[in-house]
Image (spheres, rainbow, N blue to C red):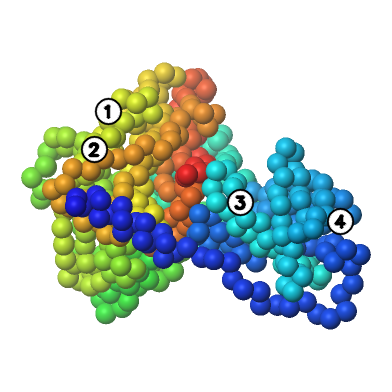
Amino acid sequence: MTRQSVSRIAALLLAFAFSVPLAACENAPSDGVETSDGIPNGYYVLSQKTVEGHDVTDGYLFNCLHLSDGEGIWYETDYTGRSEREGTVERTDEGIALAIGVREYAFAYDASCRSLTFSGKIDRQDVTMRYTYDENYALPVGGEGGAAFTDELFGEDKSENFYNYCPTAVMEGSDTLHIWYCSNKESGNITDYVAYRRGTLNADGKWEFTEKQLVLEHGESGAWDSRHVCDPSVIRGKFRMGGKEYSWLMAYLGCETSDNTRNEVGLAVAMSPEGPWVKAEINPIANFYESEDFSETAWGFGQPSLVSSDGAGKVLLFYAKGASKTCTVAEEWDLSDLDAPKLLRKAELRERGVTNASGSADCINNADFAYDPVRGRLYCIKEDFPYPTDGGVNWIAGSNTLFYLDIGDSFDLLFGDEVYTWNKIAALDTGTGHARNHNAGIVRDAEGRLTDPYSVPVLYTAAQLAADFPDWQMGGQWPSLHTYRIHGIRFTIR
């Protein structure tokens, strides 16, 4: 039996292990509840929802049904926004039939729990939902502005010379989004810092972000990262350094040059997402100057992506290599003791099945990764070559492509001799409405895993063309860089 066959079986077993039947009713109704037909009007609040056997209940800020005589409203709010769908309700022998547009949802009513349960297909997936009556429920309302997930999430006015790009994001619960990204400190000064903002989801389904906080800056003169620090990737784990244990690890690109050459990868640690962040003494962990690929004129190593191997100190470090060839390197490290890190294994990612948005063969470059333990998949979103050249902008990608690799319950496939093939899911291209789409990052949990095996949220950098600003003269800024802003998109996985 091949390793891929074993991986597929392992993935199926893992998915079975994660399947969650609806829990038994815990809250019986109080005595004396009287309704005209046994099914009370009012609010029914989601108590459990599974998609293909996986529990997705915690992905909602709130989710409820409101029933009245002959009418129903379905409220759902998650990171992508708030929806309110109105329909008609027909009482049946089993429960209710909620008709919204051309679709009808049949809910069975359990009088002992005062709950409504749906089981059937939604978007070609097996979905089961239970809603429990709550006579005291108050529908959340209001917010303080904020941005929709697909809109420009934050950023300075584009009349100034600031940029925001290359995000890495951690979703915490249903209402908190930590984003680290690359930005500059002073208008018109192209010096990269790692910035941080925390987003909170409000009742209107909009994201409200804190002010920009610069959490990592370039090193002192002569340091390996004395010119720029950017392209962060962040995970949570257990990392000791200098006698202290830290909970968060950041990999980042650093350099001492101003011409996009000789980049390297370093590490920093913190106790909390906002820092303070402390650079590791062993930096750079991906040392281009001491590698066999070194060249004075080569791009080097950078654009890292971290995935936890064990939820503690072992990590997968992916980074782009631009030297004699362009590719992505995977390394597994034991970083539980950052004073004595251990490289466990290393390999260049194979690229069979990798294409650009147009379907032509491509390499894996400037990529971000996430692991799905439910389906045993490694997801990758990478930038597409060739770069478009219209509008006076030829240095950034116009599209990205999302892939997955069946790897089962371990990362062994990446480091062995077996041939493997990537599977294309979707393209992130000008269908977003933006001329350039680049430097994308998958929204993950704190260990670098998908938050939902049937949905891949992505943050990406949108940019306008130089031709959109023909008279741009402020501070010598690039005529597109000042338009770099971060947006979100969700890909549904079936």
Q: Residue furthest right?
A: 36
Measured Cα–Cα span from mark 1 to mark 2: 9 Å
Disc on res. 68: 4
Disc on res. 351: 2
Please state which of the two labelled residues, at mark 3 or mark 2, is closer to the viewer: 3
Measured Cα–Cα span from mark 3 to mark 4: 24 Å
Disc on res. 120: 3
Image check: 313 left or right of 159?
A: left
Which callout, 4 or 1, points at the residue further toward the start of the chain? 4
The reply to whether callout 1 and callout 2 are in contact (CB within 8 Å) is yes
Q: Residue 132 location in percent, x, y?
A: 72, 67
Residue 216 visible to the viewer: no
Give me the residue at 70% from left, 77% from top: 27
Image check: 219 left or right of 14?
A: left
**Dot 1: few (<14), some (14–19), or many (≥20) neighbours within 10 Å?**
some
What amino acid is found at the position of numbered circle 2 in the picture?
Glu
Q: Secondary structure at mark 1?
A: loop
Which callout, 3 or 4, points at the residue further toward the start of the chain? 4
